[in-house]
Amino acid sequence: MERPRNVPVENTLKTKILNGGTAIGAFTSFPSPELVELLAIGGMDFVLFDAEHGQLSPAACYPLQMAAELHGLPTLARVGENDRQVQIKFLELGIGGVLVPQTNTLEDARRAIDGMRYAPRGSRGYAPSRLIDWAQRGDPKDLMQSASEYVFTMVQFEHIDAMADLEPVLALPELDLLFVGPNDLAQSMGYPGQPNHPDVQDVIDQVVQVARNAGKPLGTVAPDAAATNRQLDRGFQLVATNVVSLFSAGMKGYFGGLTARNDAAL
């Protein structure tokens, strides 16, 4: 019997979002396949490998990707640079999409998206890779087009200067989702550490309205269930918490529920 191919048929997360569905996942910046498995078992819709912050490299993401595939968990990666040579190293692992931060102009967004897909839809460089079974099971021409269709293209809105080009960025046909980063947006507005400041939230409301008018899906972050509910009600379709928040909440719940601990004896 022939082994199933790695060649992607459908990016289920991308399909879900583009069809109007919602998805809840988590950022992780830790090189732990076991943690990825626990996120899958716990019910996450996706995992987002954070290679902008922390220690994740393409090599470190390889076992994370395999752990996610074992459980059918869709994967995304946030890279630290708007550079197609960086993006392809993650995409060729089989990761379903790349999120590019600080895309503050139309040119930034075009450059980011262009590097994610092969010609004629982009300028992504080609080489046999894991994503397409090292080009050993099919015509490279067809494999490249399947890979282009598979990728979930995302750029990040996280600077007030990005408002100037928001409408033309959202009009880019190859952009699948705009991801709003409230923390760096707050910094750019003079409110470091205050993502919930009314002025910051007012800008995010404007982004939501412009994206709704453009028919473009939105993603963002939320530290807990209450914040996730608010973002979903607001119109965000893809919401990511993070493993640090999940772990911290679990620790607080655990220690908050203890009744027999005797700290005086320590």
Image (cartoon, grey):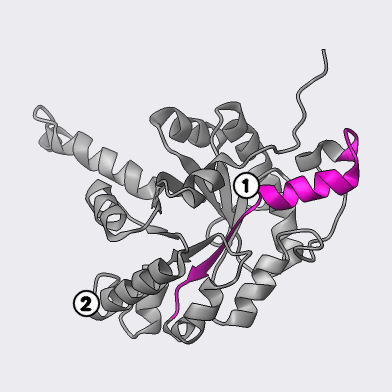
Q: Indicate left or right for 166 with 249 as reference.
A: right
The picture places residue 213, in percent across and down from the top left corner, at 40, 70
**In the image, which residues are magenta?**
135-159
The picture places residue 43, in percent across and down from the top left corner, at 40, 32
Type of amino acid under label 1: Gly
State whether residue 230 appears in this view: yes
Quarter-wise, where is residue 219 in the image? bottom left
State whether residue 92 appears in this view: no
Q: Indicate left or right for 237 with 144 as reference.
A: left
Q: Nearer the viewer, residue 24 or 264?
A: 24
Q: Nearer the viewer, residue 224 or 108?
A: 108
Q: Which label sits on residue 213?
A: none
Is residue 67 located in the magenta-colored stretch of the structure?
no
Residue lying furthest left in this view?
259
Provide the secondary structure element on which disc 2 rests. helix
Who's the residue at 88% across and 40% down the image?
135
Q: Indicate left or right for 31 with 124 as reference.
A: left
Residue occupied by mark 1:
96
Residue occupied by mark 2:
198
For the N terminus, the quadrant is top right
